[in-house]
Amino acid sequence: MGKVLVMEHPLIQHKVGIIRRKEVGSKDFREIISEIAMYMCYEATRDLKLQDVEIETPICKTTVKELAGKKLAVVPILRAGLGMVEGMLTMIPAAKVGHIGLYRDPDTLEPVEYYCKLPADCGEREVFVVDPMLATGGSCVAAIQMLKDKGVKNIRFMCIIAAPEGVKKLQEAHPDVDVYIGALDEKLNDHGYIVPGLGDAGDRIFGTK
Ligand code: PRP
Ligand code: URA
């Protein structure tokens, strides 16, 4: 079973507390989402493999560590996942970026696919799927299935706020995927929104409501 890690770091908790506030406008909301993604990326990459490499300093030869193993990719779920890409790339600038377009049908809450463009070698990469919100779990379960259908084997999922219902659904559908969560909330309401949550992440990032 993949691990589920709720990030306890005080800087993450503090910033999540800010973006929950309804008076926070799009500019600040976007900036803080990006900062949270950066801190979460730092925590979620703690277990990346290192290898020894011989180098020469201006003084002498020595052995240093460098990242080894699989190359990385970041795959935001459109639209709201876009808000986390810059923060991820600040930490792992060599990562390639794929995009998966999904939206939740407002009536059925089922994910509807409209776009998929991935790095050609994504099957050989460690892929971080990012989306600020994990609500019913429909969107991330579908996005991860799309990646698996294209041959991706190593997948991690990162979200800023999750509902317990979505975490359960994700773990049942994709038990091999590690899940990183900024804050685990109480429940979903009758419209599939996370309670207390922060409202519609896509609308708040892009100012569409
Ligand atoms: C939001 C959010 C997730 C999804 C979560 O996207 O960014 O992708 O809902 O809900 P779920 O876990 O119940 O599937 P939305 O469908 O509103 O699209 P948007 O990002 O374009 O606003
Ligand atoms: N999508 C969002 O953006 N917010 C929620 O609370 C649920 C789904």
Image: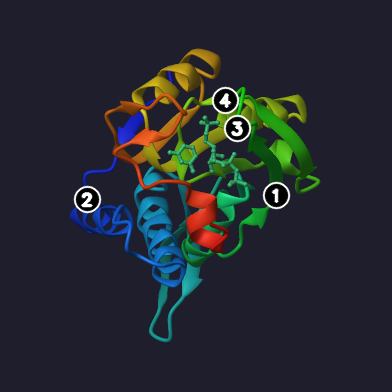
- Residue type at mark 2 is His
Could you tell whether 144 is left or right of 15 in the image? right
- Tag 1 and tag 4, C-beta contact below 8 Å: no
Q: Position of residue 117 (x, y in %)?
A: 78, 46
C-alpha distance separating marks 2 and 3: 33 Å
- Tag 2 and tag 3, C-beta contact below 8 Å: no
Dot label at residue 138: 4
Q: Which residue is mark 1?
A: 98
Sequence order check: which comes first, mark 1 or mark 4?
A: 1
Q: Which residue is mark 3?
A: 106
| Mark 4 CB lies closer than 8 A to ligand 1 | yes
Q: Nearer the viewer, mark 1 or mark 4?
A: 4
- Residue type at mark 4 is Gly
Secondary structure under tag 1 reads loop
Q: Which residue is mark 2?
A: 9
- Residue type at mark 1 is Gly
C-alpha distance separating marks 1 and 4: 19 Å
Q: Position of residue 37 (x, y in %)?
A: 42, 55
Secondary structure under tag 2 reads loop
C-alpha distance separating marks 4 and 3: 12 Å
